[in-house]
Amino acid sequence: MSMETGYWTALWLFVPALPLALWVAWSDLCFMRISNRVVLGMGCVFLIFGLIALPFDVWLWRLLQIVIVLTVGFVANNLGLIGGGDAKYAAAIAPFFAPGDLREVILIFAAMLLAAYVTHRLFQWLPPVRRMTPDWKSWQSGKDFPMGLALSGTLLGYLALPILAPWLSV
């Protein structure tokens, strides 16, 4: 799998995005909420580190992805398909993905969504896990799902691939 995002670009973006993405995943599991502050923080990570990691013209075009994903996200939110926090977070992480890597992003997202959903649904029935996390709202969310878990996994997986590629090559 050859990706448009290279080693150094991925590394510059992965390191500052990691703590925020992990926070979003945990917060969505625990509270079924993605904070606006973390969404803005992720946007700032791209504004600052994206400018370092990418050529200026590429960086500017990637900012347009925020508008596109936010528009689609709000339509999906109004249709009841996703939560508002999920829509805002998806828009905030959108510029991290190279448009030329869309196929890879879709594959990674599909895998992360399936893995997150199955893991979440299975773990909610494990007594040791429930004892450690008795107050997590996502356990009682019914049909709602903490999409921040899958979105964060997608971002981190996408950025990790070019970083790990030198060691994964055969």
Image: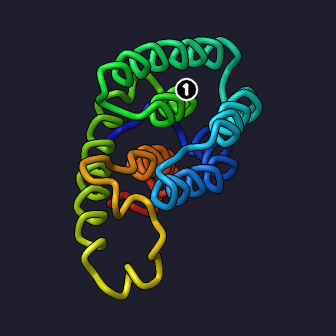
88 and 158: which one is in front?
88
Secondary element type, mark 1: helix
6 and 121: which one is in front?
121
Count how many numbered circles sit on residues in the image. 1
Is any part of residue 157 visible from this angle?
A: yes
Q: Is residue 169 left or right of residue 65?
A: left
**Image height check: is 110 above or below 56?**
below
Q: Which residue is mark 1?
A: 95
The colour mode here is rainbow
Residue 89 location in percent, x, y?
A: 53, 35
Q: Amino acid at mark 1?
A: Pro
- Quadrant of the rendered image containing residue 105: top left
Mark 1 Cα shell of 10 Å, populated few (<14), some (14-19), many (≥20): many
- Quadrant of the rendered image containing residue 22: bottom right
Is any part of residue 162 visible from this angle?
A: no
Residue 45 location in percent, x, y?
A: 71, 37
Q: Residue at x 43, y 44 (%)?
A: 151
45 and 123: which one is in front?
123
**Image height check: is 83 above or below 108?**
above
18 and 144: which one is in front?
144
Q: Quadrant of the C terminus?
A: bottom left
Q: Residue at x 69, y 33 (%)?
A: 40
Q: Quadrant of the N terminus?
A: top left
Q: Residue at x 67, y 20 (%)?
A: 55
Q: Residue at x 55, y 51 (%)?
A: 24
Residue 13 location in percent, x, y?
A: 64, 42
